[in-house]
Amino acid sequence: MVSKLTSPILLSTITFLITSLLFISGCSTAEQTSDQTTPQQTAQTIERQQQNHAEMERVFWERVQQSRMNFTQADIDFMTGMIGHHAQALIMSRLAPENGASSSIQTLAGRIINAQSDEIYLMQRWLRDRGQPVPIVNIDGLMLNIEMEMPEGDHNDHRVHDMQMDHDDHDAHADMDHNDMDHGMGMMHDHSNMPGMLTQAQLEELAAAHGTEFDRLFLTFMIEHHRGAVIMVEELFAADGAVSDTESFELASGINAEQVTEIERMKLMLENID
């Protein structure tokens, strides 16, 4: 389970805000001790307050920007990998309406699509804010294509990594990825070996199922898929120096809580299938 229960940057930000509020309160108290003030003194007081507010706001956003630079390769790998991991959950969930899933499964699938689409956007923004290559998700049926958006000023071409692969060509794709990375081409690493990821054969099996058979298979596969995401979060929190900024902490811990809750819900749903 997640071991880092607090974020150092979050605590620092809270301390800063409390100190700022106490400072403002002190200024207000001092100003109220004078019963008689001229319009000029009042204007000067307001101006000082505005200047203080502007300075505190500047310092706050400066610290926010500094915190964004406090990340590790483990953070980058997690965000990059989890985008692809979430994208496969979208492929699975989009099958529910067209494959005659029960209303409860369709509701679950809709919830997964909404939550994980939002998280993909947040992880893309996290990477973009830190000048990292950003995976752009393109889904076509059971095929997942990832195009890497390179940081501004990087003149490398965008490259596409085809996620629809069989075990036979897995090694060839993996070798291609490593070679391209060596040449700075910005290729996406292979996602198929991440915990919980379905094989192409499993995706096709799910796509061929209907009704109750689809419900049972969807829950079985999605439970394992969610467990894989939990493992990825645990590995991130175990990495030295990782999740040290507020945004990465909130993203990773939120994903963990969501996945764990849905695993328990899906286990109960699976038990109740006739």
Image (spheres, rainbow, N blue to C red):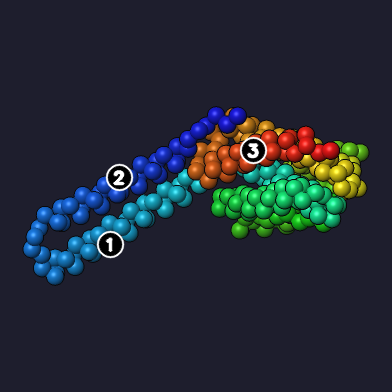
Secondary structure beneath dot 1 equals: helix
Q: Amino acid at mark 2?
A: Thr
Task: Decide: few, some or many residues near mark 1? Use Cα within 10 Å; few <14, some 14-19, many ≥20.
Answer: few
Q: Quadrant of the N terminus?
A: top right
* 51 left or right of 209 in image: left
The residue lying at 17 percent from left, 52 percent from top is 29
- Nearest the eye: 184 or 2: 2
For the view shown, which residue lies furthest in the bottom direction? Answer: 39
In the picture, the disc for residue 217 is none
The residue to which callout 1 is attached is 50
Q: Residue 224: image x %, image y %?
A: 76, 35
In the picture, the disc for residue 261 is 3
Q: Are marks 2 and 3 in contact (CB under 8 Å)?
A: no
Question: Would residue 197 be visible to someone looking at this image?
Answer: no
The residue lying at 63 percent from left, 32 percent from top is 234
Q: CA distance from mark 2 to mark 3?
A: 37 Å
Q: Residue 11: image x %, image y %?
A: 41, 39
Q: CA distance from mark 3 to mark 1?
A: 46 Å
- Nearest the eye: 6 or 192: 6
2 vs 3, front mark = 3
Q: Along the polypeptide, which appears first: circle 1 or circle 2?
A: 2
- Nearest the eye: 219 or 167: 219
Task: Decide: few, some or many residues near mark 3? Use Cα within 10 Å; few <14, some 14-19, many ≥20.
Answer: few
- The relative height of residue 38 versus residue 22 in the rendered view (above or below) is below
Q: Amino acid at mark 1?
A: Gln
- Within the image, what quadrant is residue 243 found in? top right
